[in-house]
Amino acid sequence: MGSVVNTSHRLCESTFRNVCYQFMALFPSLFFLARSFFAPRLELMAEILALRQQLAILNRTSNQPSLRFQDRLFWITLARFWQNWRSALLIVKPETVIKWHRQGFRLYWRWKSKTGRPGRPRIDAEIRALIHRLSRENPLWGTPRIQADIPRTQ
């Protein structure tokens, strides 16, 4: 009886494994089929959104369209997530959107490097005094031993 159960268990296990392998082989094709069904619709929606945004800019301004920060941010974001964004752009040149993105990148890293103090953070005076005291009291200790001892002495 035990060998029959063991054999049927092996058979179920191998069948399950085969089904899994077949599904794994079919999954990429199913994924691309689903993507091909939804991708044109998403592209169409992105294009409609881009054109509506440009119409809003033209309705908001009189002769020459003036773009706000939000408009520039919209085009930078759209350029990152939609490959065919250049085809729907009518108000400004695509190179201008790329320039805005680069300027934003530069501004971010300039801000990131200027915040706070540059360089290594300062060590508190009492921790420095503790380091000096430990090195005077234990002249044979090196840096690793003092670093390991500091948390214990605080």
Image (spheres, rainbow, N blue to C red):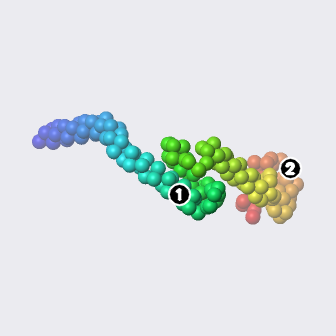
Q: Are marks 2 and 1 in contact (CB under 8 Å)?
A: no
Q: Quadrant of residue 136?
A: bottom right
Q: In this orientation, which residue lies closer to the viewer: 135 or 111?
A: 111
In the picture, the quarter occupied by the N terminus is top left
Q: Indicate the secondary structure of the residue bearing disc 2.
A: loop
Note whether 97 is above or below 3 in the view shown.
Answer: below
Place of residue 31 in the rendered image (x, y in percent of width and height, measured from the top left): 35, 42
The residue singled out by tag 1 in the image is: 55
- Amino acid tagged 1: Leu
Q: Is residue 6 visible?
A: no
What mark, if any, has residue 139 been given in the picture? 2
What mark, if any, has residue 85 been given in the picture? none
Task: Say which of marks 2 and 1 sits in front.
Answer: 1
Residue drawn at x 39%, y 45% is 40
Note whether 31 is above or below 54 in the view shown.
Answer: above
Q: In this orientation, which residue lies closer to the viewer: 119 or 79?
A: 79
Residue drawn at x 42%, y 49% is 44
- Amino acid tagged 2: Pro
Left or right placement of residue 125 versus residue 28 in this view: right
First in sequence: mark 2 vs mark 1: 1
Say few, some or many: other residues with alpha carbon within 10 Å of mark 2 (under 14 / 14 to 19 / 20 or more).
few
Q: In this orientation, which residue lies closer to the viewer: 109 or 80?
A: 80
